[in-house]
Image (tube, rainbow, N blue to C red):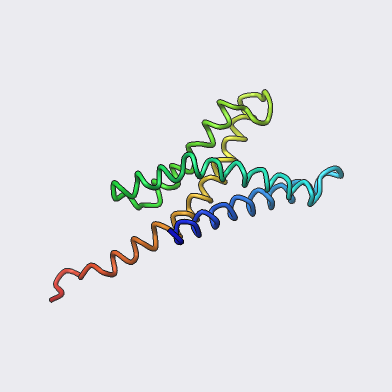
Amino acid sequence: MRKLINAIFIALAAVFLVTFSITYVDSLRSDVWGIEMAFLIGGVATIVALIVMVSWALPIHFLLKKNNLSSVKWYVLAGITPAFIFIYVFKPFGDDSAIDLLQQALFCSLVGAISAFCFWYFIAKKSLTKSSNATPKSGAL
């Protein structure tokens, strides 16, 4: 359980760091935005990620674990999927054009994929490594 909680916090930290960094770099071109806006956007993204983590990622993780699917591709796919649903169904950034919605969905998917990779690395990869080290190699007596 502790390992799961640590993986969740690491994944949420990844969301905050990515969104904070991109927002801050983007704010360098503007007089209005600054580090305060980067903290705000990073915080909001982290709260949204926590909601997605509880309602989507954890059930998917338990489903993958039950079916012995511990490959990173499943976790990254699960991290990408809710971004497109969220952007195209709720349109949280306003009533934008199709190209703007695609850009928003791609950015949110990138953040979701990075977060999913971090989660996988700390929860599934370490389990996979332990189980492969415990299995004797062929030809061993």
Q: Residue furthest bottom?
A: 141
Image height of 95 relative to 18, above or below? above
- In this rendering, the answer to whether 93 lies above or below 56 is above
Question: Which residue is at the front of the view, 132 or 139?
Answer: 132
Q: Residue furthest right?
A: 31
Q: In front: 59, or 138?
A: 59
Q: What residue lies at 55% left-to-right and 56% top-to-bottom?
A: 9
- Horizontal and vertical percent position of residue 98: 61, 25
The C terminus lies in which quarter of the figure? Answer: bottom left
Q: How many marks?
A: 0
Which one is in front, 118 or 40? Answer: 40
> Residue at the location (20% across, 70% down)?
136
The picture places residue 91, in percent across and down from the top left corner, at: 62, 27
Which quarter of the figure has residue 60? top left
Q: Is residue 77 left or right of residue 9?
A: left
Apparent side of residue 140 relative to residue 19 in the rendered image (left or right) = left
Instruction: Name the spot of residue 104 as percent of width and height, x first.
Output: 62, 35
Which residue is depicted at the point 57% across and 35% down?
A: 105
Assign the N terminus to one quadrant of the image.
bottom left
Task: Check the image and name the residue furthest to the front.
Answer: 1
Snapshot quadrant of residue 49: top right
Which residue corresponds to the image point at 16% horizontal and 69% vertical from the top-left?
138
The answer to whether 80 is drawn above or below residue 128 in the figure is above
